[in-house]
């Protein structure tokens, strides 16, 4: 019987250590490490050894193909799994194995290989292998990684850093200065406690010191840090430095405890900081991710096809992955991120262009045009169209005439006149013998559109035959129906009959339009308002009401260019970027609690001049948990206090539709000077005489909603004002940035860019996130140039292979599939 040779671990350790100490030049043994390791594998020395995983992690070119830095990393990881001779963890010598004689009952037959015959190649690591296949990763560590969405080796490779500790540009505290740029310091906590405002915990305040000085650090809305961080702890802190009460403070910085034995000044490199979870430190995450990258980076499928990379000179994805996980300089990290982002955006753009092609399949869309009605319609409008409205209408008319169904997004700031443009498009459908439908997200907005269309058709008071209008410039009467969820069963039955049998030309409603029993057989144009509140499948269901109708979607939320190309990439975009003539920019000011009396004096002055005002509150009833004025509390306070003697009305979402209509009618008629309201006022009311809007608890609202509120005023020729009331002297850094942005500009598109930067990427394509496993891992919606390049590349790829069925596009098709699936799931 011949015993299998044993693996001489001490000798192997000496050789590997010699190679590492010698600078990883592959000279520790004659001929290099690869031949030695190959002979050991062929001899079966690693057959029972966990070290075989490290050998499988080598790329096809072996150890010699690695760069020196990667050689050092591989050797270090391998040596870590070879315990020194005589240590408790050292494995015992491998037991001798006997080869049973042929024919022995119950024995396994073995095949003797000639020494020169190569052993079958071992299967290399796979992206689908569980994380526990890495040395040192047990079930408990893997369970913690799973909370980050990391279950496999492939997941670990794509767990990219969310930032870097830049030890190459550390600053002493004394050299910090107010700036929007991220600054990094290392300091020790000298004092730490909860930050309390009016007796309530609002965050954590710490005093951090180094040899040069001290700085206050504030973590807003994180009071628990006062219990988890301790005095004397050394931290790396990265964040923005601001001035408050003439003193510098670091607000909401990213931080990481620094081990006592580490001297950051000696590192002089970027250190990746990964998303983390409880019980999983950065050191462990870095080690596990590094091993996964070493094992798999060269085998990762690249969504950018090889022929595109060759034509465009795009570097390999493997090098970008390695660099982004371990960059030498900030510019290296950014260059690698942009390379990875190009692949992600290419998948997004292929998805939206494929979806657009699917929607425009066929040449049977109805041909719609205003024809002879166009001139009389424009002359009958109470105001001339702006240049932007004329341009948008021309783009829509061109699409409506074509054989393919229109897919167009009409975006414009508050008050830019989207409704009139949509109204003209709808009349093109009606005059061409088709029906049109307009879907709005709320009953208030649907009712507002109904009233707006009634006015544009010359029907100030509804005719006895409900919804029937006969403008002199239109060839026949026009019937409009309003469909909402609050209709009685009898009313719904009447509407269903009218829409199905030709008794309705225009149908305006909420989600009720999507009900299966509501048929619109001659639907030629579907209009969706406030597109961001509806999903892809919802608007598809509306289109299915007719035979391949045209689609126009509208939004009053200005959309940054990159977001429009990502979320609405299947739509052509028309933008209304100017206000009607005579409108004046709204002046905005932020009032702190001790300045309210000045604001009320200003308000009374304008009310005495016959103007009107809105006052917006975040809540209906007083809350014990939020220190903001409720609508009911504010209503009582104003009518018995600062606005005693003025007619004040109250409006909120708990009122019935009839009550809300009555309140808005009185305010629009000038019977009330002030309307106190919750956020239901965001849409659905237009009073040109309202020149002031006060927003209580303004720090509680998002930037987009604040801008929407502000658009309720400025509808007439008089100067209008927006007064932002904060409930605290210092509402925190993010809220302060939003309020200051509102004061600095009335440009909704500029504010949209600020909002996008502040909120981050968010869920911009259906549900782009599943837990923490984000589909857009490194791409940012501020990467305009990368996204535009990706769109051009996507068009080229799809021109060659519309369904991504060719073998060279297999990886891209796999990357596209989740975006198409998530877009459908979002509905």
Image: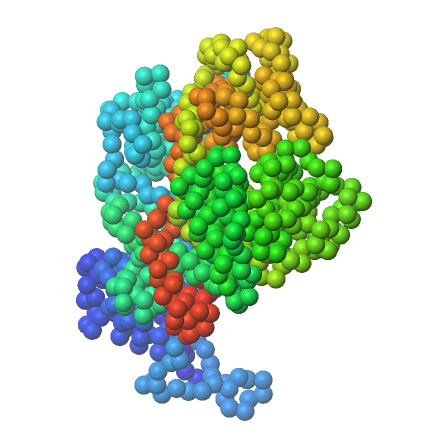
Front residue of 523 and 632: 523
Lateral position of residue 568 relative to residue 211, left or right: right
Seen at 50% across and 89% down, the residue is: 101
Where does the image place residue 789, in percent across and percent down from the top left?
33, 56
Where does the image place residue 164, in percent across and percent down from the top left?
33, 43
Q: How is the image coloured?
A: rainbow
Count of marks, rendered view: 0
Seen at 57% across and 23% down, the residue is: 617
Seen at 45% across and 39% down, the residue is: 385
Residue 811: name its quadrant.
Answer: bottom left
Residue 653 in the image: above or below residue 596: below
View extreme (bottom): residue: 103
Residue 91 in the image: above or below residue 169: below
Front residue of 135 and 571: 571
Residue 135 in the image: above or below residue 749: below
Lateral position of residue 31 relative to residue 387, left or right: left
Seen at 50% across and 62% down, the residue is: 404
Residue 595 in the image: above or below residue 54: above
Front residue of 107 and 558: 558
Q: Is residue 601 at all visible to an observer of this figure?
A: yes
Where does the image place residue 350, in percent across and percent down from the top left?
43, 61
Where does the image place residue 536, in percent across and percent down from the top left?
55, 53
Lateral position of residue 134 relative to residue 513, left or right: left
Image quarter where the N terminus lies is bottom left
Q: Is residue 755 at all visible to an observer of this figure?
A: no
Front residue of 567 and 671: 671
């Amino acid at each position: 019987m011949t015993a299998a040779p044993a693996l001489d671990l001490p000798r192997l350790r000496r050789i590997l250590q010699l190679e590492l100490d010698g600078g990883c030049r592959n000279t520790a043994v004659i001929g290099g490490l690869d031949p030695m390791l190959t002979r050991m594998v062929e001899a079966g020395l690693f057959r029972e050894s966990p070290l075989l995983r490290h050998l499988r992690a080598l790329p096809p070119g072996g150890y010699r193909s690695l760069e020196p830095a990667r050689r050092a990393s591989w050797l270090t990881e391998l040596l870590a799994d070879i315990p020194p001779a005589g240590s408790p963890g050292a494995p015992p010598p491998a037991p001798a194995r006997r080869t049973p004689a042929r024919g022995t009952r119950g024995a396994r037959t073995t095949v003797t290989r000639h020494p020169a015959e190569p052993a079958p190649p071992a299967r290399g690591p796979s992206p689908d292998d569980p994380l526990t296949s890495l040395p040192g990763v047990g079930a408990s560590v893997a369970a913690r990684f799973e909370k980050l969405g990391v279950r496999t080796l492939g997941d670990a490779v794509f767990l990219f850093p969310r930032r870097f500790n830049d030890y190459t540009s550390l600053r002493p505290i004394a050299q910090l200065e107010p700036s929007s740029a991220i600054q990094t310091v290392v300091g020790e906590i000298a004092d730490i406690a909860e930050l309390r405002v009016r007796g309530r915990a609002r965050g954590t305040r710490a005093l951090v010191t180094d040899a040069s000085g001290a700085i206050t650090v504030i973590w807003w809305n994180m009071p628990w840090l006062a219990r988890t961080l301790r005095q004397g702890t050394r931290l790396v802190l990265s964040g923005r430095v601001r001035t408050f009460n003439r003193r510098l403070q670091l607000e909401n910085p990213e931080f990481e405890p620094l081990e006592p034995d580490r001297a950051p000044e000696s590192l002089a490199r970027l250190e990746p900081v990964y998303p983390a979870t409880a019980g999983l430190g950065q050191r462990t995450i870095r080690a596990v991710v590094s091993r996964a990258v070493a094992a798999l980076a060269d085998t990762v499928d690249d969504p950018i096809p090889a022929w595109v990379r060759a034509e465009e000179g795009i570097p390999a994805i493997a090098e970008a992955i390695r660099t982004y996980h371990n960059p030498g300089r900030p510019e290296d990290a950014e260059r690698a991120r942009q390379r990875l982002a190009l692949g992600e955006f290419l998948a997004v753009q292929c998805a939206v262009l494929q979806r657009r092609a699917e929607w425009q399949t066929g040449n049977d869309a109805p041909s719609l045009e205003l024809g002879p009605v166009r001139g009389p319609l424009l002359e009958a409008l109470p105001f001339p169209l702006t240049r932007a409205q004329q341009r948008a209408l021309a783009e829509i008319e061109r699409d409506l005439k074509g054989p393919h169904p229109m897919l167009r997004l009409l975006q414009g700031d508050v008050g830019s006149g989207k409704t009139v443009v949509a109204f003209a498009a709808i009349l093109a459908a009606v005059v061409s013998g088709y029906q049109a439908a307009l879907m709005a997200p709320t009953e208030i907005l649907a009712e507002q559109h109904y009233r707006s269309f009634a006015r544009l058709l010359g029907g100030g008071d509804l005719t006895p035959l409900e919804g029937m209008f006969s403008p002199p410039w239109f060839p026949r009467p026009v019937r409009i129906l309003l469909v909402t969820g609050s209709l009685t069963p009898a009313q719904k039955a009447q509407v269903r009959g009218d829409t199905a049998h030709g008794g309705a030309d225009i149908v305006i409603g909420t989600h009720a339009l999507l009900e299966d029993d509501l048929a619109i057989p001659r639907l030629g144009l579907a209009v969706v308002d406030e597109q961001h509140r509806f999903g892809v499948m919802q608007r598809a269901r509306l289109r299915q009401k007719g035979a391949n109708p045209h689609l126009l979607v509208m939004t009053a939320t200005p959309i940054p260019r990159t977001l429009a190309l990502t979320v609405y990439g299947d739509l052509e975009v028309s933008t209304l970027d100017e206000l009607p003539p005579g409108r004046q920019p709204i002046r905005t000011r932020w009032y702190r609690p001790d300045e309210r009396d000045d604001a009320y004096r200003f308000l009374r002055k304008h009310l005495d001049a016959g103007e009107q005002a809105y006052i917006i509150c975040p809540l209906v009833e007083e809350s014990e948990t939020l220190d903001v004025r409720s609508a009911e509390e504010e209503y009582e306070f104003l009518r018995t206090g600062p606005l005693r003697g003025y007619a004040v009305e109250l409006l909120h979402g708990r009122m019935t539709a009839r009550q809300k209509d009555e309140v808005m009618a009185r305010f629009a008629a000038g019977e009330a000077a002030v309307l106190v309201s919750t956020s239901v006022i965001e849409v659905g009311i237009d009073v040109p005489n309202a020149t002031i809007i006060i927003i209580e608890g303004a720090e509680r609202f998002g930037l987009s909603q604040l801008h929407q509120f502000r658009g309720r005023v400025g509808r007439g020729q008089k100067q209008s004002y927006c007064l932002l009331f904060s409930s605290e002297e210092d509402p925190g850094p993010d809220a302060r940035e939003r309020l200051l942005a509102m004061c600095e500009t009335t440009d909704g598109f500029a504010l949209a860019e600020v909002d996008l930067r502040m909120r981050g990427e968010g869920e911009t394509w259906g549900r782009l996130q599943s837990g923490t496993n984000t589909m857009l891992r490194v791409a940012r919606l501020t990467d305009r140039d990368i996204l535009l390049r990706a769109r051009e590349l996507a068009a080229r790829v799809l021109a060659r292979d519309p369904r991504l069925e060719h073998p060279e596009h297999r990886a891209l098709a796999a990357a596209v599939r989740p975006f198409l699936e998530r877009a459908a799931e979002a509905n």
